Image (cartoon, grey):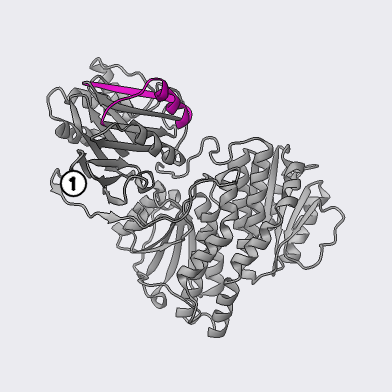
Amino acid sequence: MCGIIGIVSNKSVSTNIINSLKKLEYRGYDSAGLATISDGKINEKKCPGRVEKLEKILFQTPSRGNLGIGHVRWATHGVPNEVNAHPHSSEIVSVVHNGIIENSDELKKELEKSGKTFKSQTDTEVITVLLTEKLKKLEPLKAVFETLETLKGSFALGIIFKEFEDFIIGARRGSPLAVGYSNSENYLGSDSYALKSMTNKISYLDDGDVCVLSKDDVKFYNSNKDKINKEIFTLSEDKSSVSKGNYKSFMIKEIFEQPNTTKTCLKEYIDKIREEINFYNLPVDPKKINKVVLIGCGTAYHSCLVAKYWLEELTTLNVEADIASEFRYRKVKFDINNLYIFVSQSGETADTYAALDLCKKENAKTCSVVNVVESSIARHSDCVLPIHAGPEIGVASTKAFLGQMLVLYLLSLKISEIRNDIEHKEYKKKIGELKKIPKLIAESLKEEEKIQLIAKDIYKSKGSMFLGRGSSFPIALEGALKLKELSYLHAEGYPAGEMKHGPLALIEDGLPVVVIAPKDKYFEKTLSNMQEVIARGGKVLLLTNSSSKVISENIRFQINLPDADLTLTPFLFTIPLQLLSYHVAMFKKCDIDKPRNLAKSVTVE
């Protein structure tokens, strides 16, 4: 989950490398570094911590050169320090790497037996040492190909060479890598977002591809070492601002953007005149679908769980939701009439992409729900459904989660209509209710001041619990995940009906317990579970859309949310949980946009 950048130009590149690394910090921010070549030397500078620290180092001792590579790290092998930071350089070659070299220990032992020494604890340095040896006999491109043949695992690489100040070599296996084009300047990057400020002309490397970038030309080779051509994509103009504006963090800004992002998404998919949901090019006729399988990781997986409830409620289909890292290693029984749906904010999530690749090899029908239409998952799916949320900078996903749920609900409703599982009148009614969502989200956001007071009351707690039934259960999971991600408090989400089967043992005097209880068929049962918590001293925050206050003198807090179609309550009940996590983290003085140990785009297993 690291980020890499490479630039070859006719002018100094260090400033643009730093600017690109700042955009890549969502991929990792344990350490940062860059290397340029000038006057026949590799100039390497790196440090633990954020890119701004590296920028200060460069201000004091500038790195010159018209060619360079840069890196931001999310640590896998070795603690975050200067020695383990990338690039990893020898006297003649410097390497940046995103991914994991699975046979690094084996290779390292062999190299040490032959007298080679290592400075770092990383797997990446093995690449540097191997290349250094091969460059004694081979020219750079051949040395790279031979080195790649010895590596097992996933990687995206950027490589520069002391004796060649006019090109960079990039390579991809598993981890994403893009090439950008400009006049007298070309770029290598982990994704298009890092390159977008410099160019809108992009090509993408496929697995096994290698590229050679000079300032005026880019050459591509496949795994057979044959020269190939690549399609050049023109990136769509992104009108969304990536500045915080008057907000304290990107996350709170993105939370408050949700009325607008949901409105934008609805405009993309609902024909206003015909009151119709438009989905084109679905890879399988909904009437011929045997089963829908929803696949994702983390927050995206929670959106899959919510969609499972919707599809089961609205259609007669069998539905499964699976964690990508489990799906890819199970002995799955594939069916060409199943629809496999992959959900990912970045579209680069390694486990989700691997699960997609497995489905493609089995000729299964695939569809992706992503926020980045130029991403690997989007490009390799049979059908792409963008969520139209705009750039999400905060590592803890908020508006993308609502966007994923919204697209999945639209898809559920459309499949139901095509299969005649829903009456036409009810279908139209639900579209009408759905169009109210942006306004209802805006109303839900008005509870922020009260939620801030609740956060102040609970932020010193040692843990918490989130309970829900039906589609509120995945929302409980998501609420617990957000609190863990942002505030580092222990939090668990459970189906409320499971309390008596173990979790009740965790309830003690003063433990915060969030109870999600919309006025649905589970309402009375959820309140009964809540009373079990209260009887054991739990400090209850009740979220409901019941029009009257729930009668219980022992409820610590109650938030009443707007009334809505019951299938749509996950959208509204998510909002206070996002705000609660944010304000608890603020009281704990945590880094809101860059929580410890996490990265935005998870590009390793």
* Badge count: 1
Residue drawn at (77%, 51%), measured in percent from left and top? 540
**Image quarter for residue 364?**
bottom left
**Image quarter for residue 441?**
bottom right
Q: Is residue 404 above or below residue 412?
A: above
**Image quarter for residue 71?**
top left
Residue drawn at (63%, 48%), measured in percent from left and top? 480
Residue drawn at (17%, 24%), measured in percent from left and top? 163
Q: Quarter of the image for the N terminus: give it.
A: top left
- The residue wearing badge 1 is 222
Q: Is residue 502 visible?
A: no
Secondary structure at badge 1 equals loop
Q: Quarter of the image for the C terminus: give it.
A: top left
Q: Viewer-proximal residue, 86 or 332?
A: 86
For the magenta stretch, what is the residue range? Answer: 40-66
Q: Position of residue 439 (x, y in %)?
A: 63, 66
Drawn side of residue 587 relative to residue 183, left or right: right
Q: Position of residue 343 (x, y in %)?
A: 45, 57
- Amino acid type of the residue that numbered disc 1 sits on in the rendered structure: Asn
